[in-house]
Every structure is written in structure tokens, then in C-alpha cells.
Amino acid sequence: MDNVIILRYSEIHLKGKNRAFFENILKNNILAKLSGIDCRAEFSYGRYVVCDYAASDEAVIVKRLKQVFGLFSLSKAKRTSSEPDDIFEAAKEICPAGGTFRVTVNRADKTLPYTSVWLASEIGGRLLSFNAALSVDLHDPQSSVFIDVRDRATAYVYSASEPCAGGMPVGSAGRGLTLLSGGIDSPVSTYMMAKRGLKLTALHFWSYPYTSMEARDKVIELAGILSAYTGEMKVLVVPFTKIQEAIHKYAESNYMITLVRRAMMRIAERVAEKYRCQCIINGEDLGQVASQTMESITVTNAVVRNLPVFRPLIGYDKIDIVDYAQKIGTYGVSIKPFEDCCTVFLPDSPVTKPTLRRCEINESKIENYDSLIDEAVDNLEVFVVPGK
Ligand code: ATP
Ligand code: MG
């Protein structure tokens, strides 16, 4: 009898002819996640199992597998032959010390010399004789013994399934450029799009010395937390100081934020194309601040010509985003008090209903605007955050 971990995948079974494509990416992501741990992963049709690991590594393997998008649930199980005696030995180990229970059998191999109903009552009966503190309740049991008999050589016996991260395997939906600010929202939007299968590259706008070294390091630290889910992630840091200074110098002050955000999106599209990203992602949330009104989003979006911009948080309440950030483990770092470049040269009353025409008039007043954008794109710094 071995200890194994059974893995179940989520939406991939809906994928029809493309299923092999999704499965291959998922397998590679699982293997990458388990690298460095002495264990083996077996991928047979519809049944993924991790085995041959030391008992002391089980907790870390489970923790890592729960961070792999595309997995729906897992079970710590005993693997035995299909012989009822072997199955009973395993069932004894996983059954509870007392209370009500039920045995549920799934029999994939219909040539076996017993039926599911027979095996369930046989193992249930033996467990009752083995432990007088147990009783059977088929309808609302306190615990369960699941027996999944695959073939003559193999049955799995387990008591529970634990939820995994769900979603689609990272890399199965293409690549996206995520705008990562160091605030609460953008790590969550990054996580959400990785969960839908995007491989991500992060882009951060950094206005040193108005924003500190710590502000940049904070973004890299956030990428480190996210990399448990996203795998290795490049963080591209764009020197943004000169652009902000130029906007501040030449443009109307109440348009400062709007124009900064348009510059960000212009640069983002250029960088996305350079790094072969097929979309841009940000953490905007309708109505949250002046730069996230319909009018602001319209004029910001207007500079992006070719790529879709995804805003997975657009309909979320802040309180729900905070909950999400806590759940994925980014909140504690996000609230470290380092300034983001959006707060540099902040006007007293930012425009909440900017017009495209005024944006364009203001931008035309900025000396060498296009070459400042080129320079920012050309001088970005690349940090590679390894997958955890
Ligand atoms: P966050 O909590 O993610 O910082 P926010 O509520 O502070 O968001 P804004 O500052 O208006 O909102 O930014 C909206 C989005 O623009 C952010 O979620 C992020 O995707 C992007 N963004 C803002 N500042 C930066 C930056 N310095 N570098 C990269 N992206 C940024
Ligand atoms: Mg912010």
C-alpha cells in the first residue's frame, strides 16, 4: 500500500479536441511545481497521481499543488490492489475513530469479480466489526470512505477531497502584460488573469527619486508572491520620471493623472508588442478614484490601438478586492506605505470627466513627447522573478 495524492482537473474536460493541448500544459506546470522534491507524477488517462514521496514532504507537495491553476481538487489516498483484503487494510487506516460513516465505491473496470454495491457493503461491514464506535449513515454521514477501483492492480482509498485553485493552466490562454503598481488591486487582477490561463509579464512604472527604491522592491516582492501561481514572471520596470516631469511642466494640472495614465497605456502597448503579449491587464475598478470614471477610462483606453485591455476588477467593490488580496497573500505587502507614481504631482482637483480633445491639446504642448515615450520603452529594466 502506498501513500499517493490524487489530482482532479477543472474545466479541461470541457475542451473536446483541444484537451491534449491543455493537459500537456497542466502536466508541465505540475512537474515544474514539484521540481526539487523527490517524488514522481503519473499521468494516465483522466487520472493524475503524485507518488513515491517521503511522508515528511507530503504537506509541502499538497501546498504547492494547491497553487497550480487547472487543478480542481486533490485527495490524499492509499493505493492498493483491487483485492478486498487490501482495500480493507487501507480503509482501516483512513476511517475515523468513531461516528457515522458511509462507503462509496466507484468501479472503472467493469470486468472485476464484484459489483460496487457488494464492495461497499463488504468494506462497510468489516469496518463496523473492526471498530465498535462506528455506525453507518448512508444519507448524512459524518465521514466518508471513498474507494475508486481503477483496474485489477489498482484501487485508491481516501476520505476527503480538498479544493485546489481551479481555473485554467497558466500558459494555455496565451500571454498578457499586467500593469503591477504595488497597490492592493493590481496583484489581484494579475492573479485573476493567471487563473484564466494567461502567462504574464509584469510592467511597473517607476518615478525615481519621487518614488523610492523600496517602492520598486515592493513590486518585485509582490511578483514573488504571485509567482507561486504564475510561475516565473518577468517584471519590467519603466523609468517614468521624465514623462511625469514633462506632463507636470506643460499640461493643465487637473489633467495630470489622466495624461499620466494615457502615457502608461501608450508605453504598455508598445512593451506588450515587444514582449509578445496579446493583451494588457490593469486593476481598474469603476468609480474607485478620479482616474477610474467612465470618461477617464474612455480617454485612457483611446491610446491603445491594437490590443484588448482587460480589467478583471471592474465590477468589484473595494472590500471584496481586499478580501481577495488577503486570500492570495498579497495584502500585507500591498499596504506597505510606499508611494506609487500616480501620487506624484497630484493635483488638488483632478478632472473626473476628461475629454479626448483636451487630452490631445495638452499632449501637443509637451515638448518631445513622442521621444520621451520611446526613451522610456528603450530603457526599461528587466527583473526575472523565479517561479516558487
Ligand atoms: P492599485 O491598487 O492596483 O494600485 P489603484 O486603485 O491605486 O490600483 P490607480 O492608481 O488608479 O488605482 O491605478 C489603476 C491601475 O493602473 C492599477 O491597478 C495598475 O494596474 C495600473 N497602475 C497604476 N500605477 C501603476 C504603476 N506605477 N505601475 C504599473 N501599473 C500601474
Ligand atoms: Mg495605485
Image (cartoon, rainbow, N blue to C red):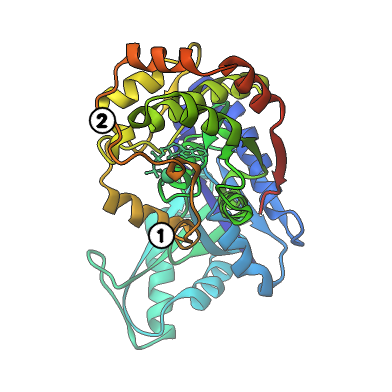
* Element marked by disc 1: helix
Question: Where residue 330 sits: x, y (%)?
Answer: 48, 56
Q: Quadrant of residue 43?
A: top right
Question: Where residue 187 sits: x, y (%)?
Answer: 48, 46
Q: Which mark is residue 21?
A: none
* Element marked by disc 2: loop
Q: CA distance from mark 2 to mark 1?
A: 30 Å
Query: Would residue 101 be found to the left or right of residue 193 on screen?
Result: left
Going from N to C along the chain, the mark reached first, 2 or 1, is 1
Question: Where residue 20 sits: x, y (%)?
Answer: 60, 28
Please, is residue 243 above or below residue 206 in the view?
above
Query: Would residue 383 be found to the left or right of residue 316 on screen?
Result: right
Residue indicated by mark 2: 352
Query: Would residue 383 be found to the left or right of residue 362 on screen?
Result: right
- Ligand 2 visible in quadrant: top left
Residue indicated by mark 1: 326
Q: Amino acid at mark 2?
A: Thr
